[in-house]
Structures are given as structure tokens and as C-alpha cells.
Image (cartoon, rainbow, N blue to C red):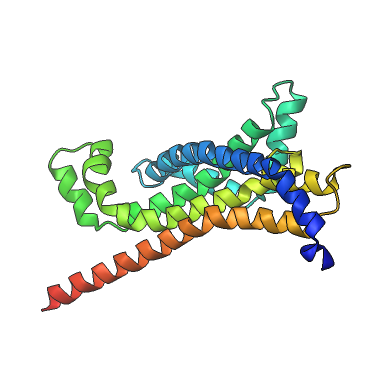
Amino acid sequence: MAGIFSADAWQKIWTFRSTFLLGLGNTVKTAVFALLMALLLGIIGGLMATSGKKALRALARIYVELIQNTPLLLQMCFFYYALAFSGHSIGIIPTGILALGIYTGAYMAEVIRAGIESVPRGQFEAAQAQGFGYLQRMYYIILPQSIKIILPPMVNQVVNLIKNTSCLYIVGGADLISVTYNFVTGASTGGAYAPAYIISGVLFFIVCFPLSTLASTWENSLKKRDARVNTAAKA
């Protein structure tokens, strides 16, 4: 524990602060691109899971179950080594984006499916009676109503995605956790274990805590609004 209070260790952290900022930048970059991919896969998966076609529903269910029931670390290693040994290596960060995007996309798909299914069935039937096609019903009628259900858990998935970038460490990534480990084991920077991991944790907290707070606040706000609407309806 003495290392936590070592002035030399904290001075070393300050001197090499750009290393931690580089790791944070790579973590944020990976998370942003993986999120875009996850949103695309989530929307496609959610729409397939709620479509009227059995084959599409089956494909969406296979994707979700396969991804959710295998560890992210295993998936990360699979994509990294499978691409490397096939001669199509795309680099550590792009591999992380691919693995995290596919992994988070499965959870996004479930969030979107639940949001769509929360809309009363009568809304689907009314839109269909007006001549709307499936995609038109979703775009104009269903998704706008399900947004309030979808957004809070989706923000939580974004937080999980950011934290899961730490799995890049297993394939030697340049994310925040990886550069922290390289820092504490480096020939000229090694030894400052406690301060380095504290700083790494603080940087993750700075990024994730506002998003977690936003999700909780948003969810509580929606619950209070629904309670007011129900009270007014009963009156």
C-alpha cells in the first residue's frame, strides 16, 4: 500500500501522463466505432426479431443466443487469431471494434426488440390497416413510441461497451488497460502499480459515470411522467 503514497510514483505518472491519455483516446475511439456497428446490428436484429417472418426471427434469435452465451474474451481471441492466421489481419483496434460491435449488437437487438414489443398491439394493427408496410410502420409509428423504453437500457449498454474495451488487453491492444499494464511493467516506468491503476480507474469513471447517471435519471424521469399520466387518466 505504500506505493499509493509514493511521491516518486505519482511524479512518474505525471511525467508520462500522455501515455494514459493515448490509451484513453484509443479506448474512446474503439468504443465510438464499435457503438456505431452495434447500433446498426441492434436495429437490424431487433427488426428481424419482431418481423412476421419465422426465418428472420430464427436468425435473430441464433445471433443473440450465440453471442450472449459465449464470453467476450473468447470472441475477441477468435476474431483476432482467426483473421491473423487466415492472412487477413486488420490490426488490434479494428479487431476490437469488430468484436465489441458484434457483441454489443446482440444486447442492443434485445433492447430494441423489447422496446418494439412494449408498444400495444393495436398500434401495429392500426398502422397496417392504413396501408403502411412493415418498415413504414416501424419508422413512423412503432419506433417513435418505443424510444422512451429503449434509450435508458441502451445508454447502459454504451457504458458496458466502454468498460469492455479492456478486453483488448488479451490481444495486446493499445487501450487504456493495455497501456497501463505496459507502463507498470516497462523498464523505465515500472513499479508505480497502485497509482497507475488508480489513474486508469479514475479515467474510466470520468467517462462512464456521467452516462450511468444519465441512464438512471432518464429512467426515473420516464417513470414519474408515466405515473403522472396514469394519475391524470384515473382522475
> In the shown orientation, is residue 232 left or right of residue 8?
left
- Residue at 75 percent of width and 33 percent of height: 81
Regarding residue 74, the answer to whether it shows in the image is: no
- Provide residue 25's location: percent of width, then percent of height: 59, 39
Task: Tell me the quarter of the image containing the C terminus.
Answer: bottom left
- Residue at 62 percent of width and 31 percent of height: 94
> In the shown orientation, is residue 43 left or right of residue 145?
right
- Provide residue 131's location: percent of width, then percent of height: 15, 38
Depth check: give the residue in front, 203 or 214. 203
> In the shown orientation, is residue 155 left or right of residue 17?
left
Depth check: give the residue in front, 206 or 229. 206
Q: Residue furthest top?
A: 87
- Provide residue 37's location: percent of width, then percent of height: 49, 36
Q: Residue furthest bottom?
A: 235
- Provide residue 52's location: percent of width, then percent of height: 33, 43
Task: Tell me the quarter of the image containing the N terminus.
Answer: bottom right
- Residue at 46 percent of width and 56 percent of height: 211
Height in image: 81 above or below 162?
Answer: above
Height in image: 66 above or below 219?
Answer: above
Depth check: give the residue in front, 223 or 27. 27
